[in-house]
Image (cartoon, helix red, strand yellow):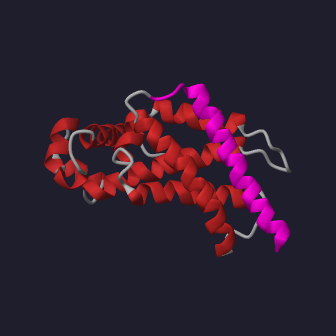
Amino acid sequence: MVSKQSDQPDRRTVKTQRQLKMMLVKLLHDKPIDKITVAELARASDIGRGTFYIHYKDVYDLYDSVVADTVNQLTGIFQTYYPRDGGNNFTPLAAQIVTSIVENQQLFEALTNFGKDVKTLKRMNALFVYYVLDAENIDTSNTKYRAAVGFASCGLIGTVTDWLTSQTPFPTDDLVIVISKSIAAMKEVAVSFKHSA
């Protein structure tokens, strides 16, 4: 009998990786990543250090995996909700982004180090820029287009970061409106450059 190989990781692997990711996010709320050890993560996740190393090279590898998961989640939202073919209703996209941020607030706070982690913020910015340019069929390799849309995208990310770190954040409905208008502005900038070329 031939065993059937699956492309899906087994449930124990998924469970262990999920537990490690959750513990990393929790620990990032208390201390910077360079102060978190594999031993501490393994203890908090109730696994052995050897098990940790089966899944990740080190704490930074685990962190990169968490960031990649987050970027993939945002990518899925953009692919599903960004209006194609000239549409201008960005409210469903903005609502999904806000829902994701609210449901994963602790994750977003930890990954952006409460707005201080430039590397992660740049990855999110690059994602927004790419999807706006790609959706509008604009050359994503053109630095002028990327810079212009990136500028608008930084405003969106700054707004979200301020909202996450505010002691008294404004209502999520208002955040949806701000994000929707910010994405519309990114599109408008991209399209204006496309037509002036």
Please say if 116 is above or below 101: below
User: Considering only vertical position in the picture, is 102 above or below 81?
Assistant: above
Q: Is residue 162 visible?
A: yes
> For this rendering, which residue is in front, 15 or 149?
149
Whether residue 37 is situated above or below residue 165 in the rendered picture? below
Q: Is residue 78 left or right of residue 118?
A: right
Does the segment drawn in magenta span residue 170? yes
Pinpoint residue 116: horizontal percent, then vertical percent.
35, 52
Q: Main secondary structure of the magenta part?
A: helix
Task: Determine if residue 3 is in view.
Answer: no
**Percent from the top left, x then y, of residue 190?**
74, 61
Identify the residue shown where x is 80% and y is 49%: 84
Dividing the picture into quadrants, the one containing residue 140 is: bottom right
Q: On the picture, is 79 further left or further right than 43?
A: right
Left/right placement of residue 154 relative to residue 168 reads: right
- Give 82 or 154, whichever is nearer the viewer: 154
Q: Magenta stretch: residue 187 in it? A: yes
Q: Who's the residue at 27% across and 43% down the image?
A: 28
Question: Which region of the structure is painted magenta?
Answer: 169-197
| Image coords of residue 173 (percent x, y) | 61, 26
Quadrant hosting residue 177: top right
**Residue 195 or residue 96, whichever sits in front:** 195
- Front residue of 70/32: it is 32
Tell me the residue at 29%/42% (across/down): 20
Say how many tags the image has.
0
Measured as percent of width and height from the top left, residue 9 is found at 44, 46
Q: Quadrant of the C terminus?
A: bottom right
Question: Which quadrant would residue 132 be assigned to in this image?
Answer: bottom right
